[in-house]
Image (tube, rainbow, N blue to C red):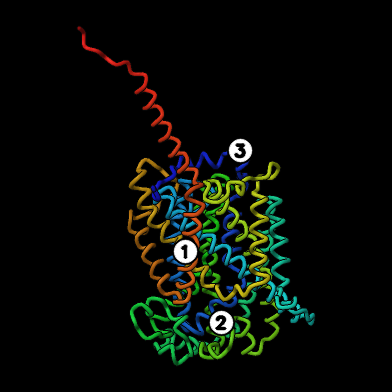
């Protein structure tokens, strides 16, 4: 049983041109940059920083964002080198298959499915909530949920997922144009809210910038949300201080998950060797600046201690506490528009990862077929949309939000390590972008991502272990037996054995002369 068989880069590129399973190259640098901003700047920009400030880092949440951005930038360099060397759909899954083998590739692909499925479902769920909030803000009272006997249905996610699944089926270029319009609108709203917020900033609210560490028990935090590293070491859970700053970085890493999704679109990019690095890094730079400005505004408007007293602190909470309730309507609208584009990009990424896995036979091959007219995986996109809609519309999926972070970070670790393996195995490759400083950045990236993983909640690790167990069971029950690479290796061995047997039979026996 060969679980570490690798798929050559040349084979991956050739498979991308397989008739009936190809994608059209239509995306530009601008499209990629906007895609990264679109998936990273959603409703989270108005809430995740406020929550991390209130319960983890205080005003130092700004540093948490910088740490998360640096970690993401290091990993994204590794993605960019891989993506220019192997410009096909599948992102970290394809990169791992080419370097560390099928089993690890399956695990990373399975984790990417976790990341993208959970992210799309969670954000679709919140989209419905924000829609109801916005309607209430303009005096239209429609509840976010409807009771259907014993089942609760959230109607908002069903609508938004259905709309954007249809858009994606109609073509990647069309969805990119819609994405560009929505993203420009939401950036304008974010900038307006930031400028308005700075009019209420008071310098004393930034003091102390890094609050003194205190036991988490004093804040009512249970072991389930205790960082896994402190749980393993037996340390008493704490908030604020250095550990709070790091926990905040692990939490706000959610803000940067979109950039590995951008890498999944490599097969649909025009001139990927130049376009991919430019688009990814430009998007990351814009997103980092926006998040830092928002956290400076929210922690400067009100003390972090007041935010911690609120049930669900956000930027809207800060405006409410300073008496500027008018901003709630603007923020609700910004959140609604922001989440719209996030959902669309995540749905596209989910379909591309599963398409790559199905091409290789690890998932049913029929899923990877593309439509003749638009060259989109229409059937698979619809299946992904249905699954996301059902999960978001009928389950309390928001309880598993941190699963998104751990799925992303695990992929980042494997891609960072994969760069080292790729350079050793294929020194002949000359990718258009190469991570500088030799092995230093890939090693540092892998170490930082692991460190952030271990600072996620203990309960998140428990759910992650369950997800991995289910994935491994599926691989050995289906994926291993149906792997195209395994079948081809078996066919080659059988052919070689048949040839050897035939040659042996054709040999004429020699006799000694009498």
What residue is pinned by disc 2? 298
Q: Quadrant of residue 444?
A: bottom left
Look at the numbered disc 2 and give the secondary structure of its residue: helix
Alpha-carbon span between mark 3 and mark 1: 33 Å
Alpha-carbon span between mark 2 and mark 3: 52 Å
Of badges 2 and 3, the one in the foreground is: 3
Neighbour tally class for label 2: few under 14, some 14-19, many 20 plus, Cα within 10 Å: many
Look at the numbered disc 3 and give the secondary structure of its residue: loop
Q: 451 above or below 52?
A: above
Q: 113 above or below 315?
A: above
The answer to which of 329 and 6 lies nearer the viewer is: 6
Q: Which percent across, then down, holds residue 280? A: 52, 57
Q: Quadrant of residue 318?
A: bottom right
Alpha-carbon span between mark 2 and mark 1: 38 Å
Q: Which percent across, then down, holds residue 35? A: 60, 59
What residue is pinned by disc 1? 468
For the question of whether residue 210 can be seen, the reply is yes
- Mark 3 or mark 2, which is nearer the start of the sequence? 3
Of badges 3 and 1, the one in the foreground is: 1
Q: Quadrant of the C terminus?
A: top left
What residue is pinned by disc 3? 19
Residue beneath the point at 64% across and 52% down = 380
The reply, left or right, for residue 461 in relation to residue 39 is left
- Mark 1 or mark 2, which is nearer the start of the sequence? 2
**Residue that lies at the very extreme toward the top in this rendered image:** 514
Of badges 2 and 1, the one in the foreground is: 1
């Amino acid at each position: 049983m060969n679980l570490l068989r690798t798929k050559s880069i040349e084979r991956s590129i050739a498979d991308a041109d397989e008739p009936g399973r190809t994608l059209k190259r239509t995306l530009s640098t601008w499209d990629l940059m906007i895609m990264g901003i679109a998936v990273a700047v959603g409703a989270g920009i108005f809430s995740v920083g406020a929550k991390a400030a209130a319960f983890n880092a205080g005003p130092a949440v700004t540093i948490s964002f910088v740490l998360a951005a640096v970690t993401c930038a290091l990993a994204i360099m590794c993605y960019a080198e891989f993506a220019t060397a192997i410009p096909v759909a599948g992102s970290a899954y394809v990169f791992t298959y080419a370097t560390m083998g099928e089993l690890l590739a399956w695990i990373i692909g399975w984790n990417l499915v976790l990341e993208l499925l959970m992210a799309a479902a969670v954000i679709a769920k919140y989209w419905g909530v924000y829609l109801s909030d916005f309607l209430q803000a303009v005096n239209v009272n429609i509840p976010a949920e409807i009771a259907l006997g014993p089942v609760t249905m959230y109607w908002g996610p069903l609508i938004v997922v259905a709309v954007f699944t249809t858009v994606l089926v109609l073509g990647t270029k069309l969805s990119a144009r819609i994405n560009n319009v929505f993203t420009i609108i939401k950036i304008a709203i974010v900038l307006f809210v930031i400028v308005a917020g700075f009019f209420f900033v008071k310098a004393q609210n930034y003091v102390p910038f890094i609050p003194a560490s205190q036991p988490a028990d004093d804040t009512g935090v249970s072991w389930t949300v205790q960082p896994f590293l402190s749980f393993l070491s037996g340390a008493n859970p704490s908030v604020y201080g250095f550990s709070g700053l790091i926990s905040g970085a692990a939490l706000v890493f959610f803000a940067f998950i979109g950039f590995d999704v951008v890498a999944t679109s490599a097969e649909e990019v025009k001139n990927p060797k130049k376009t991919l690095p430019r688009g990814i890094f430009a998007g990351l730079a814009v997103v980092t600046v926006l998040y830092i400005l928002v956290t400076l505004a929210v922690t400067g408007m009100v003390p972090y201690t007041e935010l911690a007293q609120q049930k669900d602190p956000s930027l809207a909470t800060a405006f409410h506490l300073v008496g500027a309730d008018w901003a709630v309507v603007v923020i609700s609208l910004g959140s609604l528009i922001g989440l719209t584009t996030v959902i669309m990009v995540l749905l596209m990424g989910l379909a591309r990862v599963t398409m790559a896995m199905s091409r290789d036979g690890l998932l049913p091959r029929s899923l990877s077929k593309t439509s003749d007219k638009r060259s989109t995986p229409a059937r698979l996109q619809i299946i992904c949309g249905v699954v996301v809609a059902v999960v978001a519309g009928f389950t309390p999926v928001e309880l598993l939000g941190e699963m998104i972070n751990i799925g992303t970070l695990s992929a980042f670790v494997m891609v960072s390590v994969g760069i080292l393996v790729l350079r050793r195995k294929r020194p002949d490759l000359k990718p258009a972008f190469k991570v500088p400083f030799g092995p230093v950045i890939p090693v540092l990236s892998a170490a930082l991502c692991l460190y952030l993983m271990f600072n996620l909640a203990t309960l998140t690790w428990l759910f992650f272990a369950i997800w991995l167990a289910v994935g491994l069971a599926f691989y050995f029950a289906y994926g291993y037996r149906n792997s195209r690479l395994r079948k081809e290796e078996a066919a080659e061995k059988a052919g070689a054995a048949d040839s050897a047997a035939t040659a042996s039979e054709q040999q004429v026996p020699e006799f000694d002369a009498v």
